[in-house]
Structure formats: structure tokens, C-alpha cells
Image (tube, grey):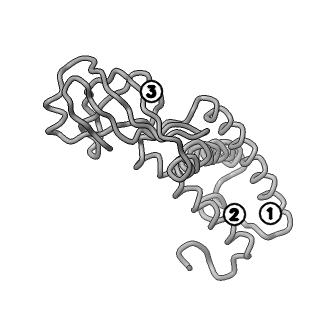
Amino acid sequence: MNLLWKKDIPGAQKILIGTFMLWMLGALVPIFFRSFVPTQQWQKMAWGISLLLTAVSAIWLRALYRKNLWRPSGPWLTYGPFKRLLMAPLCMAFFVVVVWLNVAVTLPLGYTSLVHAKVTRSASVEKKRGSGRSCKHQIEIPDMRYLFFEFCVNADNFDTLPKGPVPAELSIRRSFFGDHIHALRLNAATQSAAP
């Protein structure tokens, strides 16, 4: 484990590093699973929870530092007081976003996958070219306003879709936290797609 910490690192700092690594890995989930849309209410609550968890973490980190159970390392030691004053809020903001991704998307997606109600609803969808390598052909659902939402289809299905809005039926796994768009059936083209 010398890759993550040195031999003389206190146990509390090892727990801190391990916890932070788990939060970082959890924050990657929305990048790979993009068909979950948290509710607006839950997104707002997740910001509050993220700010609270970050504040508690900062207080805990300060307490560990005063007890000499946590020692900064890496480039932090070479920074002067002014640079540390600038970097501290940036690090805190980054951690708030990482925690928010976990609380707003990763944990609710896991919960919704296990505990959900199956719902279908009608919607108007349009084809859209994606910018990333993993999802070049997408179906856009205009009333799904969420930054990380993508519904990918293969190139063959994409090319057969007409331009403009197409009526579709969405198959949704719904929980308190949000909707996981599981599949959709295009009414006009009588085709179905799944992410």
C-alpha cells in the first residue's frame, strides 16, 4: 500500500485517504451510467447534504491535524501562505461537487435499481448526434433537463429515425430519488431501444 501512503502514516489518515478514494470512484458512476435523472427536489437536497458533509469533513480534518493524526503531503508542503489560502476553497469546492455526484446520482441510482416502481409514459423524442466516443448516437428527450442525461442507440437505429420530434413511450424505473430511463419504444418507427 505504499502507493497510497507511506509506512509512518497514522491510521486516521489512512481511513481519510481510503474514504476519499471511495468518494472519487463513486463520482465516476454518472459518467458511465447516464440514463438516470434525479428529481429536482432531490438535487437541491443533495447540495445541502454535500455542503453539510464537506463542512463536517473539514472540521474532522482540522481536529485530526491538531492531534497530529493527519499531516498534509505532496505539493501542499511547498505552497506559501497565499497559495494555500487560494487552494483551500478550490479543494473544498471540488470535494462538494464530488460528494454531490455521489449523493445526487450514484447512491440514488443504486437504490432505484433495487427498489423501484415500473412506470411508462409518453414523450416526444428527437435524434441527436453526441460529442463523445462512447455515445455518438443519442435520442434526446427535451423534457429531461439534466446535464448528465444521455440515451444512446446504435448507428443502425439512429439512421432509420426521421428528423424532428417522434412520439415515444418511455419505460421508467422510478423511486423517490428519480427516474432511470430503462428503455423507449418509438411509436412512429415501431422500433425499441435500450441503453
Question: x, y percentage for residue 16?
Answer: 69, 65
- Residue at image position (37%, 36%) is 150
- First reached walking from the N terminus: tag 1 or tag 2: 1
- Disc on res. 72: 2
Q: Report the amino acid beneath label 1.
A: Tyr
- First reached walking from the N terminus: tag 1 or tag 3: 1
Question: x, y percentage for residue 105?
Answer: 54, 44
Q: Is residue 76 above or below residue 108?
A: below
- First reached walking from the N terminus: tag 2 or tag 3: 2
- Disc on res. 65: 1
What is the crowding at mark 1: few (fewer than 14 residues within 10 Å), some, or many (at least 20)? some
Q: Is residue 18 left or right of residue 110?
A: right
- Residue at image position (19%, 27%) is 189
Q: Quadrant of residue 24?
A: bottom right
Q: Is residue 14 left or right of residue 1?
A: right
Marks 1/3 in contact by CB < 8 Å: the verdict is no
Q: Is residue 9 above or below residue 31?
A: below
* Distance of label 1 from label 3 (alpha carbons): 44 Å
Secondary-structure class at tag 2: loop
Quarter of the image where the N terminus is located: bottom right
- Disc on res. 145: none
Q: Is residue 121 left or right of residue 64?
A: left
* Distance of label 1 from label 2 (alpha carbons): 9 Å
Q: Report the amino acid beneath label 3.
A: Met
Judge by depth and name the residue closer to the eye, 56 or 66.
56
Quarter of the image where the C terminus is located: top left
Q: Is residue 22 above or below residue 149?
A: below
Judge by depth and name the residue closer to the eye, 70 or 48.
48
What is the crowding at mark 2: few (fewer than 14 residues within 10 Å), some, or many (at least 20)? few
